[in-house]
Image (tube, rainbow, N blue to C red):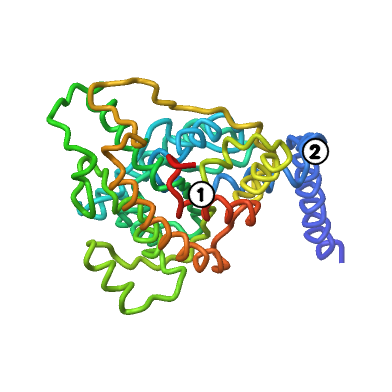
Amino acid sequence: MIGYLLPVLALSLIVLLLNHQALMANMCQPRIASSVSKHQILHQTKYKEKARLDFIIAGFPKCGTTTLLYAFMRHNETKIAPKEFCGMNGNGKPESRIGSLNKVIQDFNNTQSSDLPIHRGIKCPMAISDTTGIQLISANFRYTKIIVGVRHPVSFFQSFYNYRITEMYNIGDIEPVPSPNELVGNNKWRDVSTDLARYELSLMQLGKTPMSPIDLNDLATHKKRLTPTRYKIFLYSIEQLEDSNEERSAIFRADLQRFLRLEQPFPPFRKENVNRIVNPETINICDEQYAQLRSLLVNQGKKTMNWMQEFLLSEDVVVSSKEYFRSLVQSWGEDPCLR
């Protein structure tokens, strides 16, 4: 009997010793400090997941895109490439184009704070015109949001034309500059043309409105592509960035914050990249010699204005202070130089 009990007692003793060691080891394990909440742990894990592209400032040039760029650079929940990045556009190999974009996003990761949600973005004001980049992004990033700015077609044309002249002198790439009166239709110089002021040609590519055979033919004639996307679009007019109505301005910033799902508000925007340089080719589009050009832009503006009403019906298009925005768009059918 004793011989039978000895092995049982020995086994029980071993089990007790193992349980004691496990208990001691558990007591010696470092504990999570009480100041670190479960929410924070989940929060950190969430934002260490696969890199995302959360938003793109996709257009249009000289429509406040630099103002937004600096606003995002100052906001502590957003990271954005400090310069324009359009490496995903064009007809190069998709692997190369997406690789260059991923490199930019990876740079964001290298500077990311581990306990703060970061919304990553890029600025490419011509992305809304050349949608090869948006098409590539749509195939690789599921939840990217698009931000698009517009303005009166007449002031848009003047601002973009004068900007290209200033840029030409700044980089030393001097060449004969065509008259603005020559840049009609698809006859463009450094992307400046009256066609670019037809915002619907670019926006209808995203497939947010019903398309008629005439629309499809218009796209094909202008070498545009139908690039349907599930992405949400935040549409604004440049006047909304510079709005002197403080209440309406605050609503605009809150709507942009909500669109991007940021927790902290935007402070009032600062006006950035104001071109005050006058070169020999710099124009004042209100001069009489450009009256015919203005007339063309205004007539185009009336058509764009009507199309925009349909665009605003899409559930994917977000606009702040919609009635105010509509009133701004209504002015596109008038010559601003004759007010």
| Residue 237 image point, x, y percent | 52, 46
Image point 24% across, 68% down: which residue? 220
Q: Earlier in the sequence, mark 1 or mark 2?
A: 2
Q: Residue 54's mark?
A: 1
- The residue furthest right is 1
Image point 26% across, 53% down: which residue? 95
| Residue 39 image point, x, y percent | 75, 46
Q: Quadrant of the N terminus?
A: bottom right
Q: Residue 290's mark?
A: none
Residue 221 visible within the image: yes
| Residue 10 image point, x, y percent | 79, 54
Is 324 drawn above or below residue 212 in the view shown? Answer: above
Tags 1 and 2 in contact by the CB under 8 Å rule? no
| Residue 210 image point, x, y percent | 44, 76
Amino acid tagged 2: Met
Q: Which image quadrant is residue 224 in?
A: bottom left
Amino acid tagged 1: Asp
2 with respect to 249 (left or right): right
Q: Residue 27's mark?
A: 2
- The answer for how far apart the CA atoms under marks 1 and 2 are is 43 Å
Q: Which of 197 and 318 lies nearest the eye of the viewer? A: 197
Q: Which of 88 and 313 lies nearest the eye of the viewer? A: 313
The local crowd at label 1, few if under 14, some if 14 to 19, many if 20 or more residues have their Cα within 10 Å, is many
Image point 28% across, 66% down: which residue? 219
- The residue furthest bottom is 213
Judge depth for marks 1 and 2 and give the one in front. 1
Is 313 drawn above or below residue 110 in the view shown? Answer: below
Image point 47% across, 50% down: which residue? 148
The local crowd at label 2, few if under 14, some if 14 to 19, many if 20 or more residues have their Cα within 10 Å, is few
Q: Secondary structure at mark 1?
A: loop
